Image (cartoon, helix red, strand yellow):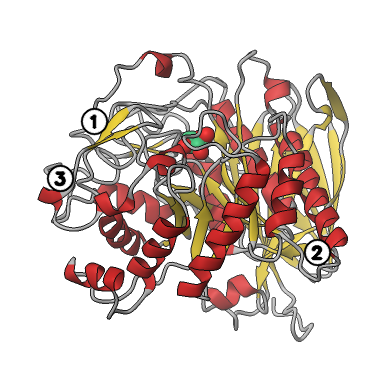
Amino acid sequence: MKARVRIDRDYRIGEVDRRLFGSFIEHLGRAVYGGIYEPGHPFAEGRGFRRDVLDLVRELKVPVVRYPGGNFVSSFDWEDSVGPVESRPRRLDLAWRTTEPNTFGLNEFMAWAKEAGTEVMMAVNLGTRGIDAARNLVEYCNHPGGTRWSDLRRSHGVADPHGIRLWCLGNEMDGPWQVGQKSAAEYGILARETAKAMRLVDPGLELVACGSSFQGMPTFPAWEATVLDLCYETVDYLSLHSYYGNRSDNIGEFLGASVGMDSFIKSVVATCDHVKAAKRSKKSMMLSFDEWNVWFHTDSEDRHRDPWTVAPSLLEDVYTFEDALVVGCLIIALLKNADRVKIACLAQLVNVIAPIMTETGAAAWRQTIFYPFLHASLYGRGVSLDLRVESGSYASAKYGEIPWLEAAAVFSGSGTAAAVADGAADLPGGELTIFAVNRSPTEAMDLEASIGGYGPLRVLESIEYAHPDLKAVNTAANPDRVIPRHVGGTGGGAAGYGAVGSGGARVEGKRLSVRLSPLSWNVIRLQTAKDVRTGGDTL
Ligand code: AHR
């Protein structure tokens, strides 16, 4: 099978916001207790943070982590989670019907995030609570001192304000499962008034309003239209959530998930732009895809848990290789919409539908989905390019025509925000990375790419992620069963990867050719010669 791609420096989608590679920690199952926090574990440091988990979070370079929920936040009293641990109450968590001990709370999470090198995206409870609790929480977190809530923080041993910029105005408020579900009109007004009060405390906040819980909600996209009609000028982002599963065991349909994600994003963009036009607004609403992943393996077992236990195993999907391919396709869909999707959170980060798993007594390990997320986070920062792709396609019942090839490309080099942020602004040339999934279960794909505007190219590295068994998983006992391989290039292989192979991508002038194995995720990193500021060749 053949596929052709045209890439050109002048065809740009937009700058990839670093927060596109965010994730999520909810007080749910073993995400916190037994996940990021496990006092007494051999790998725990003095505060109880698991160092092995921190190492893997840092490896993923997660720029932002959403906290503390999720459904959990809609009946959470934040005041229970601060102050001396011995006086914090144990509470019923109504979202997951567990007991929340509150031994790990807000200030512990902020300290953990600092260790992990990540920003925090904080959610406020707009289910059982509202404006008052939200504005007090902002005062507790961000006001320097001299007032009731900021002085309470100081009395808890946190002298400097946390300075949290990014906030979610509730979670999935359209969902019947949500404690304190609202109609769109009720929520739109509450979001607007809560945003107003929070900004009066701290004008520097960036605020995310809740979109629909998923595209299949009967009220989608009327919910978005009504909510935005009420709070358009007051919020900065609208949220999207979506989970995908292979319930009918049909790999072709499952791999179409990114086509579904792309159409979901485009529908939300259209709705936002309709409201913008109706309001004669100058502002374009940006999107926060703050929950996305594969989630279906544990659907039935999670329905039969005993209630009110502390940190039970919940939503502990063990991911197969085919799940990793879908996660790769979904990341490509996010990159292709980088002009409007500025924040995205892989839900979640540890133990709960997560790339990182722990077991008491053993070292944390990487699930199959860890790798495509890692590659995108490491090499997907820069300018997302608008590819012209020609590949055949196949028909799917759910998503219509699905191209055999799913691909995106990101240029990161001198002059791009990513390079400036990495302190690499003065590097000659830059790096062009192509992410590609061959969806064919039977045929290898000969991909030819013509790449304009970057001068001579050199293959730094070709990575292939493929496996003969689509259902293969990693486990604590066999954590490296499914891992990517370096298949070529001059860049060498990173530790923990499969053996360096031969082959991979080749370039001649501006032409790249590479053979993509059936059902594979591929990362092709090219060094570009041209310095985009001066136009001078540097190779
Ligand atoms: O991520 C798991 C749950 O999925 C979140 O708590 C909720 O927001 C969504 O329904």
Task: Identify the residue position indicated by label 3 in the image.
Answer: 39
Q: Identify the secondary structure beneath mark 1.
A: loop
The quarter of the picture where residue 401 lies is: top right
Q: Please tell me whether mark 1 or mark 3 is closer to you in this view.
A: 1
Q: Earlier in the sequence, mark 2 or mark 1?
A: 2
Q: Of residues 431 and 262, which is closer to you in this image? A: 262
Residue 12's tag is 2
How busy is the neighbourhood of tag 1: few (under 14 within 10 Å), some, or many (20 plus)?
some
Residue in front for this viewpoint, 433 or 131: 131
Q: Is residue 235 above or below residue 5?
A: below
Residue 223: % across, % down: 71, 42
Mark 3 or mark 2, which is nearer the start of the sequence?
2
Q: The N terminus lies in which quarter of the figure?
A: top right
Please name the residue shown 32% across and 61% down the image: 110
Residue type beneath disc 1: Val
Decide if residue 276 is on the left or right side of residue 133: right
The amino acid on which the numbered mark 2 sits, given as a three-letter code, is Arg
- Answer with mark 1 or mark 3, whichever residue precedes in sequence: 3
Estimate the x, y position of residue 152 in percent, counting from the top left. Answer: 23, 68
